[in-house]
Amino acid sequence: MGLLLWSLSMPILLVWFFCPPSLWAQSTYGSSRSAARALDVLLQDYAYRAFVHPKTGIPYDGIVPSNFTGIKITAVRFRRGSLYRRGFKMYKEFHIPIGVIEQPYVKRLVLVYQNLGNWSMVYYPLPGYTYLTPVLGLLAYSASNLSATGLLELNVTATGDPILIRFPDVKSPPHGAVTKCVWFDLHGYHNFSNVASGNTCSTIQQGHFSIVVESIAPSPQPIKVGIIVGSVLGGLALLVLLTFLVLWVQKFKHRKKMQQMERAADVGEAVHMTMVGNVTAPVAMVTRTQPVLESEYAP
C-alpha cells in the first residue's frame, strides 16, 4: 500500500518540479495563431469602412470596435503601376520603395496598416522575449470591391530595396541585451533579424513586425524558494508518515488476530502432545467409541 502511494505521487511531483514553462506555453500557441488570423479579417473589414469617398494615395484612418480599444488601423488605395513605379515614402512607420509587386495580379490594391498596441502580446505571444515596441502589421488586399469582407491577402514582394519599418518609440533594453527585429508571416512562423540604427527593421514581404529583446529570467526570491522547498519536503514527509501508518495498521491487525487465536485455544479442550520422532504432535488419550466386531451381532 505504501509503495503504491509513493509510485502514484512521485510522477506528479517530478512533472511539477522539472517541467519547463515553455511546454505549457506551447499548448496555447495554436489558438493564438487562429485568433490573430481572425483579427486580420476583422480589421480588414473596419479599415475598408473608412473608404467613404476614397482618393488614390490618401491614407484613411479606420475605427475599431470598442472592445478592441488601443488598436489603430489605416487603409490607403493604390494603382498597381503607380505603386511599382513610385513607391510610398511615409505610410505611418513603413517606407515602401520602388519595385513592389503583388500576386495575384490586380489593377488596384489596398494596403491595410495595423498597430496592435497593448494587444500585441495577446495575439502574438513570443515566449522568452519582451516587446520593446507594439506589433505593426502591413497587409495587402484587392481594391476591386471596397465593400468586400473576408478578403484573402495578396502576396507582396519588394523586388528592389527592402521595405523599411522605422519604430519611433523603442523602449530601452536591459543593459547588455541585444535587440532583434521579429517578423511574423501569415502562416504562423516568425523570423529574427538585426535592428538597424537602433529602431529600423527591414523586410521584402508583408506581415507583422516588432522589436524584441530576449527576456532575462529574474532570480527567484529566497522566500519563494523556501516556500517551494518546504512544500516539497512537507509532501514527502507526509507520504513517509502515511506509509508508516499503513504498515502499523497492518501489523496491529495481525497481532490482534493472533491474540484471538490464543484465547480460543485457552478455553477449548486440552490437547495432549507427544513426541513422534523429532516432531511434537497432538495425540488422543482415549477412544470415545469402542470398536465392535461384526461377529458379535451375528445370530
Image (spheres, helix red, strand yellow):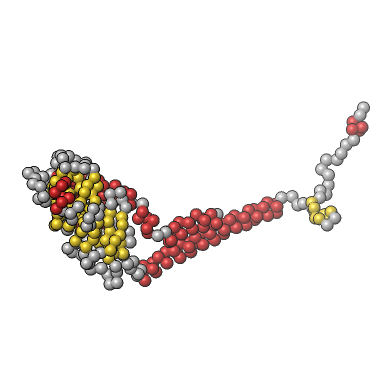
Q: Is residue 186 visible?
A: yes
Depth check, front residue: 9 or 254: 9
- Quarter of the image where one finds residue 232: bottom left
Q: Quadrant of the N terminus?
A: bottom right
Where in the figure is residue 108, as x and y percent of width and height? 15, 44
> In the rendered picture of this protein, how many numbered marks are placed on residues?
0
> Image point 81% across, 48% down: which residue?
284
Q: Which residue is farthest left?
A: 53
Depth check, front residue: 264 or 24: 24
Q: Is residue 257 left or right of residue 3?
A: right
Where in the figure is residue 46, as x and y percent of width and height? 16, 46
Where in the figure is residue 153, as x and y percent of width and height? 23, 45
Look at the picture and state if 128 lies above or below 48.
Answer: below
Where in the figure is residue 216, as x and y percent of width and height? 32, 67
> Image point 15% across, 47% down: which residue?
81
Q: Is residue 198 left or right of residue 126?
A: left
> Image point 25% across, 64% down: which residue?
195
Q: Quadrant of the C terminus?
A: top right
Q: Is residue 263 visible?
A: no
Q: Is residue 149 left or right of residue 20?
A: left
Look at the picture and state if 164 lies above or below 62.
Answer: below
Look at the picture and state if 171 lies above or below 296.
Answer: below
Q: Is residue 1 left or right of residue 163?
A: right
